[in-house]
Image (cartoon, rainbow, N blue to C red):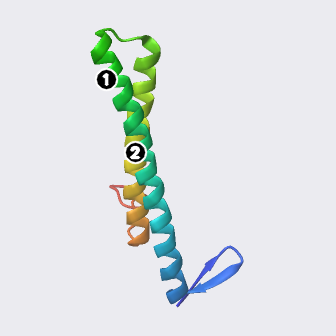
Amino acid sequence: STVLLGMVIFHSEEMSRAQDILLVVLTMGFIIGIWGNGLFGIINFTNWVRHRAIIIINLILNSLSTSRICFLILMLIESFLLVLSVHPHSIGPF
């Protein structure tokens, strides 16, 4: 079977290869994002523990780091579901 994506027609083997490449790229972005945001959060957390006081900007930055990690996890799960041909947006009670 063929899948029409934009103006290019992909056959099932090519689509599988494209999905594999997409999944690898997204996984690498996920790992780099988790490492970067995790390192940033750990550095701010250790400064907070060391000085025993939290500055409002560090609280905001830690919150942003945590929310970004959660966002990356959700995007990775959605990417895996997309590649496995499960449509998470079409599943529901409605």
- x and y percent of residue 30 in the render? 43, 53
Residue 50 appears in the rendering: yes
Note whether 16 is above or below 42 in the view shown. below
Disc 1 to disc 2, how far (Cα)? 16 Å
The residue that disc 1 covers is 46
Residue drawn at x 50%, y 81% is 17
Within 10 angstroms of label 2, few (less than 14), some, or many (20 or more) residues? few
- x and y percent of residue 83 in the render? 43, 70
- x and y percent of residue 57 in the render? 47, 16
User: Which of the marked residues, 1 or 2, is nearer the chain's N terminus?
Assistant: 2
Q: Nearer the viewer, residue 20 or 88?
A: 20
Residue drawn at x 41%, y 11% is 55
- x and y percent of residue 85 in the render? 41, 72
Q: Nearer the viewer, residue 15 or 91?
A: 15
Tag 1 near tag 2, CB within 8 Å: no
Within 10 angstroms of label 1, few (less than 14), some, or many (20 or more) residues? few
Residue 52, by quadrant, is top left
Q: Nearer the viewer, residue 20 or 8?
A: 20
Note whether 87 is above or below 44 in the view shown. below
Q: How many marks?
A: 2
Instruction: Say left or right for 88 vs 2.
Output: left
**Which disc, if any, is residue 35?**
2
Residue 87 appears in the rendering: no
Q: Nearer the viewer, residue 28 or 90?
A: 28
Tag 1 secondary structure: helix
**Which disc, if any, is residue 18?**
none
